[in-house]
Image (cartoon, helix red, strand yellow):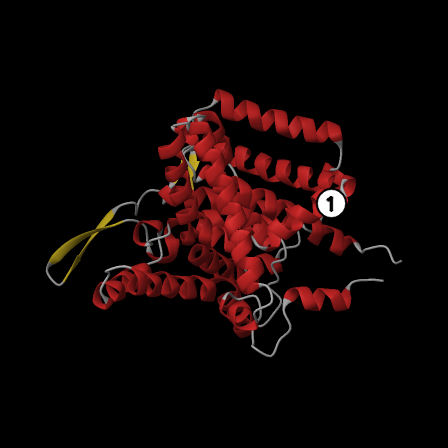
Amino acid sequence: MEKPSIDSKRIGYIDIAKGIGILLVVLAHSDLALISAYLHKFIYSFHVPLFFFLSGYFFNAEVPLQLFIKKRFNAILKPYLFTILLIYLAFVSFTKMSIGRALGRILKSMYATGEYIEWIPLWFLPSLFVTSLFSYFFYRLLLTHINNRIFRWSLLIGLLALGLVFIDRFFPFRVSLLGKDYELFGLPYSLDIVLLSSFFYMFGSEIRKFSLDKIINNKLIFLIIGGALISLNAFFSQRTDLAMRIFDSFFINTVEALLGIFFILAISIQIETSNTKISSVFKYIGQASLFILIFHGPIQEFWGAKIFSITDIRYFSILSGFVISILISLGIYKIFVEQNRIALFWFGRISSLSQKNDSEMNKKITPK
């Protein structure tokens, strides 16, 4: 049997990191803050930057612009638009919502920030889309011409610092249209945080150039990173919540986010190298992370509230809602999507109905 290449190892632990990350996202979207404000703050300090980083890890600015936009649209924006249509089709079909009201909600969702989306976590997808496009142009116009790594990273840090200048300038802001004043929350597609999100996205691409598995696959380094992350969240009150445009401290929140990213990657590498079964579970969760992101919210809210009304036990209802939302989301992916070419197409997992899905493709290229 051939040994897997370094790239395949990286794909493995990146999928594991996505699996861990999406579990933390779901937990953070529960009523966790009611039972542990610290744990809630801890997760929020890095979970969204983690996914921008992971999304940018395989970023390639060398492909033609038209192909890049097509791929990003299919993988990110098409699932968002399709999910929005599914949501309101379900509302019209199974509730008393009128078609006119549903069309109004759909139009409102095209603004694509959390304040205007029925299932708030979906804000990340349009934000990721514009982040990837901005990063593409930033790389092509600037970074590809700079070979000095220190200078490159300084530019990215400058990008982050500039982004923080605008972090709350548009949340909210007022506009006048046809003689009426409107208060809006964030720019369309979260363009107001694109400089900040692009820092983490492009940082993922920069980090890929290192043998990361060799650097952080060390128990002492793992303990140092984890201890520093835990301590910063314990001793500093500065918060991070990109959906709500909160990034209180350039230094503290940036360090927390980067430590959290490397902490999850270190855990992922340890899982991949030490336990095959657990590794497979987290990889599968990571591969289904899009569907967990899409479906977990209403499932967790419904079952958490229902179980709490029966048991009146906060801890148990939160844990139950969390587990049930993960299992049902995975079930939706397994039963209705994984082997359904039409669903795979509309959720952006394949670019055409004639293409094989990812799992079938992987079987063909797996070393024997």
Q: Is residue 315 above or below residue 106?
A: above
**In x, y percent, where is residue 176?**
16, 57
Instruction: State the count of labels.
Output: 1
Identify the amino acid type marked 1: Lys
**In x, y percent, where is residue 22?**
54, 45
Q: Nearer the viewer, residue 52 or 87?
A: 87
Q: Nearer the viewer, residue 351 or 160?
A: 351
Q: Is residue 317 above or below residue 230?
A: below
Q: Is residue 313 above or below residue 351?
A: above
Q: Residue at x 56, y 43 (%)?
A: 21
Q: Nearer the viewer, residue 61 or 264?
A: 264
**In x, y percent, where is residue 141?**
54, 62
State the residue position of label 1. 277
Q: Residue at x 42, y 48 (%)?
A: 299
Q: Is residue 302 rendered to the left or right of residue 183?
A: right
Q: Is residue 50 above or below residue 123?
A: above
Q: Quadrant of the N terminus?
A: bottom right
Q: Residue at x 62, y 66 (%)?
A: 62
Q: Secondary structure at mark 1?
A: helix
Which of the 4 image quadrants contains residue 288? Answer: bottom right
Q: Residue at x 55, y 64 (%)?
A: 337
Q: Nearer the viewer, residue 70 or 290?
A: 290
Q: Is residue 42 rendered to the left or right of residue 147?
A: left
| Residue 81 can be seen, yes or no | yes
